[in-house]
Image: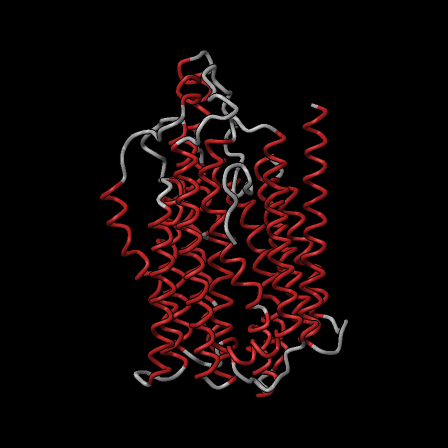
């Protein structure tokens, strides 16, 4: 999914940490002016990052496909559970800080400021990591015995992996804020390939067992940090080119107000933004992973039903790969919008949302049609036979739900950009709660179909609620 050039983009990750800067008197000329170096740099960076994330998605899928082929159903189900739990935790406690860092650094660079504040984001990140470690140690027996069936190796893979990803996600935010998308793409590419090598080692007979496959999840974040020395060696300590409006504003009477808004990243503001995004990330991960966890909780150790956990996880891989690619678009647009926000009109903002949703609709429609025609054959060929049958209608329904999920992500970024983070968070949490209730109760006899239909309904409700927030906010802006 190629990010649109120019203004055809999502309002991804824009936050409300500071009020938008007042446009200065030297706004760039409209009309047929050639693209600025800043816009060209953004477009090139977005393309590079999309390639990197797309490659990451392929290696992630191959890692899970190899694991599914090489491990017995019970072992693969435990690997799937470890994966699901780990990435729920990572998205909830670390991605908010990644976005906070990216937005803050990009905003300051757009204003020509240096010495970006890292202490408060680091304190919040460290607090989240410490909170996780405390909980993991306190509930070790429950996690090790109740979730991983007594596997000490998987418990420590989870603990070490989550702690190591604190540094990896902090680095992602720093790189995105400096618009070093080629290194960001390299970071996630190294992460996915290093993890895949462990599954490959099991496939070729160098290693064996679930512990060897799972070890890749703990090693990957360490391997990803190899790009950081290259980042420090090339960062230029100067303001980005092509920002005359920001420079002019700094010379005008509003200079003091703009400087204060750009630099005053207090703990209250940083934590407030992080908590809002935590709610959104928690709800999103619930939509992607709660079905797997509910099926696992209902298994009660039965061998056939334990295999069902891995099967449901495979069904929801249809959602994971596109969402991972979409994160590349969000990441690349976030720092670009930090500079664009002060000059963008409401019509440009609306056009960006329309273009992005059209691209998503076309992509999701093609995916759903493909799943309806050849979905069961492709899923079985790639992920192996697990004793259950992939239903083509159910797979297509998940594909449509994925499209609604991506549209909701776009509308969510619009809500954040327009100071509606609280309303967006409520919409996400309500939809995720509805999904959990639907899957946890016997609404449909087949657990797999229940997860497929529940995901579609949850994404549909979420998209509708966020569309309502978007339209309400747009109406208020037109009458203001």
Q: For the point 38% across and 53% down, which residue is it? A: 185
Q: Is residue 347 above or below residue 439?
A: above
Q: State the quadrant of the C terminus.
A: top right
Is residue 393 shown above or below 246?
below
Residue 435, x across and y down, in percent: 69, 62
Q: Is residue 480 left or right of residue 386?
A: right
Q: Residue furthest top?
A: 253
**Along the horizontal axis of the image, is 407 left or right of 138?**
right
Residue 426 placement (x, y as % from top left): 66, 47
Q: Is residue 308 visible?
A: yes
Q: Nearer the viewer, residue 392 or 439?
A: 392
Q: Quadrant of residue 168?
A: bottom left
Q: Is residue 126 visible?
A: no
Find residue 466 and report its horizontal and vertical position in percent. Answer: 68, 46
Measuring from the top left, give residue 34's x and y in whole percent. 44, 29
Q: Residue at x 67, y 49 (%)?
A: 427
Q: How is the image coloured?
A: secondary structure
> Image check: 443 left or right of 463?
right
Q: Which residue is rendered at x = 36% and y = 81% of the image?
A: 202
């Amino acid at each position: 999914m190629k990010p649109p050039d120019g203004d055809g983009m999502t309002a991804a990750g824009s936050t409300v940490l500071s009020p938008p800067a007042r446009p200065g008197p030297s706004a760039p000329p409209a009309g047929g002016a050639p693209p600025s170096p800043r816009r060209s740099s953004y477009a090139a960076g977005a393309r590079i990052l999309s390639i990197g994330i797309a490659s990451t998605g392929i290696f992630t899928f191959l890692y899970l496909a190899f694991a599914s082929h090489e491990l017995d159903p019970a072992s693969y189900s435990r690997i799937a559970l470890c994966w699901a739990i780990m990435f729920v935790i990572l998205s909830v406690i670390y991605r908010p800080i990644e976005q906070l860092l990216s937005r803050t650094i990009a905003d300051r660079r757009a204003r020509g400021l240096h010495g970006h504040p890292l202490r408060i984001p680091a304190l919040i990140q460290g607090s989240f990591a410490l909170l996780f470690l405390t909980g993991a140690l306190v509930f070790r027996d429950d996690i090790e015995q109740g979730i991983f069936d007594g596997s000490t190796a998987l418990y420590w893979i989870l603990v070490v992996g989550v702690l190591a990803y604190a540094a990896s996600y902090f680095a992602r935010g720093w790189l995105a804020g400096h618009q070093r998308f080629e290194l960001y793409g390299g970071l996630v590419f190294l992460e996915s390939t290093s993890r895949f090598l462990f599954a490959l080692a099991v496939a070729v007979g160098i290693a064996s067992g679930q512990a060897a496959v799972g070890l890749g999840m703990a090693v990957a974040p360490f391997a990803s940090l190899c790009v950081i020395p290259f980042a420090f060696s090339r960062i230029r300590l100067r303001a980005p080119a092509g920002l005359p409006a920001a420079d002019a504003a700094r010379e005008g009477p509003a200079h003091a107000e703009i400087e204060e808004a750009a630099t005053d990243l207090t703990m209250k503001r940083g934590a407030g933004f992080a908590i809002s995004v935590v709610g959104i990330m928690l709800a999103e991960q619930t939509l992607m992973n709660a079905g797997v966890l509910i099926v696992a909780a209902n298994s009660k150790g039965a061998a056939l039903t334990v295999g069902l956990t891995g099967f449901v996880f495979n069904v929801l891989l249809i959602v994971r790969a596109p969402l991972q690619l979409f994160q590349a678009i969000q990441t690349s647009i976030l720092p670009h919008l930090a500079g664009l926000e002060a000059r963008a009109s409401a019509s440009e903002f609306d056009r960006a949302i329309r273009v992005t949703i059209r691209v998503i609709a076309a992509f999701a429609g093609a995916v759903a049609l493909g799943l309806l025609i050849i979905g069961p054959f492709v899923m079985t060929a790639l992920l192996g036979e697990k004793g259950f049958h992939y239903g083509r209608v159910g797979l297509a329904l998940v594909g449509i739900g994925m499209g609604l999920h991506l549209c909701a992500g776009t509308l969510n970024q619009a809500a954040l950009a327009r100071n509606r983070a609280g309303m967006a968070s409520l919409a996400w949490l309500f939809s995720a709660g509805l999904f959990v209730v639907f899957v946890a109760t016997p609404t449909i006899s087949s657990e797999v179909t229940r997860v497929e239909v529940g995901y579609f309904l949850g994404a549909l409700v979420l998209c509708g609620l966020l569309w309502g927030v978007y339209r309400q906010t747009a109406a208020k802006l037109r009458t203001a």
